[in-house]
Image (cartoon, rainbow, N blue to C red):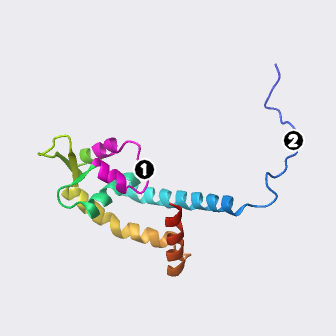
Amino acid sequence: MTDNCIEQPVPERRALHPEPLPRVELFKALVRAGDKQISETNSLCQEFGITGSQYNVLRILYVNDPGIGLSCSRIGERLISRVPDITRLLDRLENAELIERCRCEGDRRIVRTRLSAKGRELVEQIDAPLLALHDKLTESLSDEEVAVLTKLLVRLA
């Protein structure tokens, strides 16, 4: 039996493309920037005992609830990034007493979700630190650059 872990000579390689491709470089920069934003946001949310996805749901309810709650599908439509199992995420938020769910009396198949008082307080507590984080993560950009970049990225989405 031979030892396959012995250093072998590396075959000569050439670049797939002779120079960087602008669209590939854009893709890599977008992924890296997005990963950094998500990682920092998740770290901040963890300080408050929730995940970034859970905060996203709480924020959606805080901003969009007309007073009667939102259906699961309405929450899903507004998520920044898709969550594979929103029902389980809502279960965790309900167990933490951050949301309340109730069945619609007119159609018992419809379940509406709304923030609890505790959930509302948490969203308000996270707001200032999250805005400060957004400022920190974009401090190398001018307000005009932020506006232009936002406009361009919306076109890609």
Depicted 40 relative to depicted 141: above or below? above
**Can residue 50 be seen?**
no
Residue position marked by numbered label 2 in the rendering: 11
Horizontally, residue 43 falls left or right of residue 2, namely: left
What amino acid is found at the position of numbered circle 1 in the picture? Arg
Residue position marked by numbered label 1 in the rendering: 82
Among numbered discs 2 and 1, the one appearing first in the sequence: 2
Q: Quadrant of residue 119?
A: bottom left
Stretch of the chain drawn in magenta: 72-92
Q: Residue 68: horizontal and vertical position, in percent? A: 17, 56
Depicted 25 relative to depicted 9: above or below? below
Horizontally, residue 34 falls left or right of residue 71, namely: right
**Viewer-proximal residue, 49 or 80?**
80
Q: Nearer the viewer, mark 2 or mark 1?
A: 1
* Residue 75 painted magenta: yes
Q: Residue at image x 15%, y 43%?
A: 107
What amino acid is found at the position of numbered circle 2 in the picture? Pro
Q: Residue at image x 49%, y 66%?
A: 154
Horizontally, residue 68 falls left or right of residue 122, namely: left
Q: Quadrant of residue 131?
A: bottom left
Q: Residue 156: horizontal and vertical position, in percent? A: 53, 62
Q: Residue 108: horizontal and vertical position, in percent? A: 16, 41
Q: CA distance from mark 2 to mark 1?
A: 42 Å
Badge 2 crowding class, 10 Å Cα cut-off, few under 14, some 14 to 19, many 20 or more, is few
Depicted 83 relative to depicted 131: above or below? above
> Which mark is on residue 71?
none
Depicted 60 relative to depicted 3: above or below? below
Helix, strand, or loop for circle 2?
A: loop
Badge 1 crowding class, 10 Å Cα cut-off, few under 14, some 14 to 19, many 20 or more, is few
**Viewer-proximal residue, 47 or 118?**
118
